[in-house]
Image (tube, helix red, strand yellow):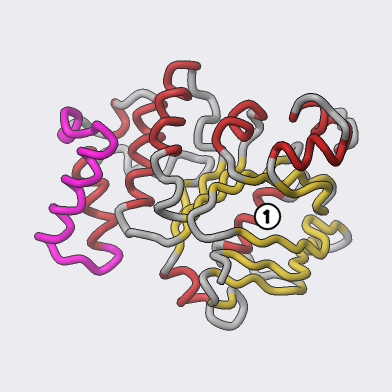
Amino acid sequence: MNAIEAKGLTKQFKERTAVDSLNVSVKKGELFALLGQNGAGKSTTIRMLCGLLAPTAGDAYICGHSVTKEPLLAKQVTNVSPQETAVAAKLSVQENLELIARLYGDDKKTAREKAEKMMDAFHLTDRRKDRAKNLSGGWQRRLSIAMALITEPEVLFLDEPTLGLDVRARRDLWKHIEELKGRITVVLTTHYLEEAAALSDRLMIMDKGRCQAEGTLAEILEKTGKASLEEAFLSLTEEVYE
């Protein structure tokens, strides 16, 4: 069974179709990158898969649970680190982690143990007492991902996890994301093509709400006849003027 199976997934906003009959499968333990320009439908797709937005048509199954018929069961096996860093600014690193664990039903002792484990895994132990608002952007993103992982999801959605970070902070976060591969299923959205090429097992390029290409990097390059992911991406997407 695939971790994610979307069939005919569609979302319309009045006259605009944001996602158009999307079919996608993601294997368990796979890191799957979702690429596209602004307005391509990436974030809308993620929101439907997370159960935050109801599809207009079609359905998606997360670890076998329908997002339309069994949304609570689907949500229980997922978590998301959103594009906007989701941390409580006035709480410390440790307090943020324990808060999420408690919200998901852990008792105080278990929440503390899980927080210790996450702080160790993400090298946050020395910053445990620092308020989140005093952390740099890279450290806040690291904390945000740790907060998503503390609930022990089977599927993790990372929406633009390195957006706005400097080169060193991005590379450091890449290492943490790579360590998740094979352990849990990760769906990554990013505008950084080199990030997708470096991290993903497979990827999908979207344009105007539709899948333009899906597969490994090698398969997409072979399909398009291009030498790089950037060239393939440009050939499959239309130029957009803001």
Residue 80 lies left or right of residue 208; in this view the side is: left
Residue 191 lies left or right of residue 116; in this view the side is: right
Q: Quadrant of residue 18?
A: bottom right
Of all residues shown, which one is farthest toward the top?
Answer: 167
Quarter holding the N terminus? bottom right
Q: Quadrant of residue 194?
A: top right
Amino acid bearing label 1: Thr
Q: Quadrant of residue 132?
A: top left
Residue that appears at 82% across and 32% down:
232
176 and 68: which one is in front?
Answer: 176
140 and 89: which one is in front?
Answer: 140
Residue 37 image offset from top left, x and y in percent: 76, 37
For numbered disc 1, what is the local secondary structure? helix
Residue 61 image offset from top left, x and y in percent: 60, 72
Tell me if residue 18 is in the magenta stretch.
no
Residue 222 image offset from top left, x and y in percent: 82, 37
Residue 176 appears in the picture as rendered: yes
Residue 127 lies left or right of residue 63; in this view the side is: left
Residue that appears at 80% across and 33% down:
233
2 and 171: which one is in front?
Answer: 2
Residue that appears at 70% across and 38% down:
217
**For mark 1, does the 10 Å Cα neighbourhood hold few (<14), some (14 to 19), or many (20 or more) residues?**
many
The rendered magenta stretch, by its main secondary structure, is classed as: helix
Which residue is tagged 1? 44
Of all residues shown, which one is farthest toward the left?
Answer: 109
Quarter holding the C terminus? top right
Tell me if residue 122 is in the magenta stretch.
yes
Residue 48 image offset from top left, x and y in percent: 63, 63
Residue range in magenta is 103-129
